[in-house]
Image (spheres, rainbow, N blue to C red):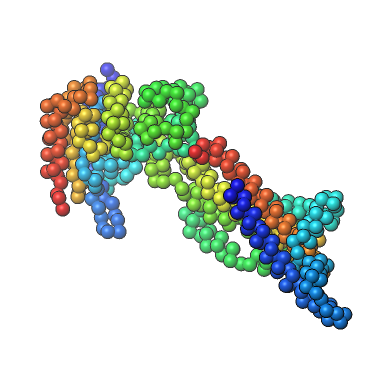
Amino acid sequence: MRKILAVLCVLAVIVVGWYGAAISLNAKWTHDQAKRAGTEVQFSELVADTLSQERPVLPAPHQVAVELWKTTIQKKVTSKRSLVFHGWITLSATLMGFLIGTTAGILLAVGIVHNRAMDMSVMPWAIASQTIPILAIAPMIIVVLNSIGVQGLLPKAFISAYLSFFPVVVGMVKGLRAPDMMQLDLMKTYSARSWDVFWKLRLPSSMPYFFASIKVAIAAALVGAIVAELPAGAIRGLGARMLTGSYYGQTIQIWSALFMAAFVAACLVGLVGMMQRWTLRKMGMTQ
Amino acid sequence: MTEAQLNDLAEPVIAARNLDLTFHTNDGPVHALKDVTLDINKGEFVSFIGPSGCGKTTFLRAMAGLESPTGGKISVNCMTPDEARQKRAYGYVFQAAGLYPWRTIAGNIKLPLEIMGFDKSEQEKRVRNVMELVDLKGFGKKFPWQLSGGMQQRASIARALAFDADILLMDEPFGALDEIVRDHLNEQLLKLWARTNKTIGFVTHSIPEAVYLSTKIVVMSPRPGRITDVIESTLPKVRPLDIRDTPEFLEIAHRVRDGLRAGHAYD
């Protein structure tokens, strides 16, 4: 009960602050309009107008809520104006990118742990890859892939994988190295092959690390998918909604796409959390 | 008797000759073992006792092929420790039980059997047998955290026994347990030894534990790690716990303590 109260309290503060910001940020437009018409605006008129502009600098929460309602519940999901449709486009790229990224991350981590040359060489490259702004490299990936005939979902998935493989590499290297000397010595007394050490010791030990890192990875994958939709001038997906929204000053559209993206991210992270709890309980690792 | 069997009788199970082992650390070389010579015969219960840094654990690890000596020779069943390990000559019990938290007790005991490729029905049979041997019947489906420390250590002994190696190497297996549990496990270990007739190497720093368990007590001292005394126990093979109050027991304990004191430079 106290917890719910605290959450509601924080929420209320955010909403009130938001309304305040909307009024003050949108007031300029209202004053300009009034000046042009040669009229004075009362405070109540100011409030009413700033919260109902068609292209506000900052849309009010209820405007975003109405837009969200209109574009999710009231539109058919196959419609190009449906946020569910656009959300699905982005989600499918996210999931595919996440799969590619996680697989690549695990394979790299296995290589790093088992191969000295890879141990010495791969990590600096992986870190370097993350220092390049994704916004700079995304158009190039799309152009290059396009020129060799790869279009559609895959280029977006690659960019999303580019962001999501990194936390998996870092987490899994740590996880696969989690077994201590004694546990490795025990395996040695059985003359266990490295195959057995991997499947029976290293991999199970890495599971808590794995889930922690894919929680980060799946959120990064979503960011990657949205960013990938921007440079190609895509017409579908949440990123495309944000882009067209910014072309035409449709701030309400941008904000509703943002909220949709946040909602999708929350669902994905929540889903991973559920998988984590289920798996670790199955493994008897939660008490 | 065949010639091979005769050889078995004649040759010690573990034979160390002038064993040297030096670790190279950042602070210079550390002589963990220097000129160690020892025979362990079949069916003996040998304890290694000494202060920390005397090389008792290193010696045990050398027998297991977990450390490579820098000089001298050591053989296990007339083979190098590495070959012996590949022939599953020994089971090793570490100071901590080291059970896998994601495996049940039965699953943990099954681990070496899976790695060594025993078939499924044989695995089940052996797990059942050794669980009975260490008095853990009925706990197979429990996870390690559901068991007490003493029970976990018993499970780890069962794991070392599962593939039926002739030699059992134990590195302070009861060091982390309280006195009462320790007494109980010592008693059980003796019974187990009597039933299975295994050769046991046992590292400890408790004098009563060493005297109570062993047929042979090896006293070691540090810097460099070496053997200062080897005491053959005169106690009978069947030993109730109260044997520890007999004059004979106290006399052996006294000799061990003297040996420890003599080898100990209080620097």
Using residue B22 as the reference point, say whether residue A236 is left or right of it: right
The answer to whether residue B231 shows anywhere in this view is yes
**Relative image position of residue A165 (x, y in whole percent):** 60, 55
Which residue: 22% across, 37% down? B206
Q: Give the residue drawn at x 56%, y 65%.
A: A128
- Res B81 seen here: no
- Residue A99 percent location from the top left of the image: 65, 49
Total labels: the figure holds 0
Front residue (pair A177, A25): A25
Residue A211 coordinates in the image, percent (x, y) = 57, 48
Using the rendered view, name the quadrant where residue A149 is placed.
Answer: bottom right
In front of the other: A49 or B4 = A49
Most distant residue in the right direction: A37
Q: Nearer the viewer, residue B245 or B135?
A: B245
Q: Is B149 on the left-hand or right-hand side of A210?
A: left
Image point 53% across, 55% down: which residue?
A: A170
Left of B146 or right of it: where is B153? left
Q: Quadrant of residue A145?
A: bottom right
Residue extending furthest toward the top? B1
| Residue found at x 53% / y 58% | A122
User: Where does residue A249 sit, x and y in percent of width and height?
Assistant: 80, 69
Q: Reply above or below: B255 against A158.
A: above
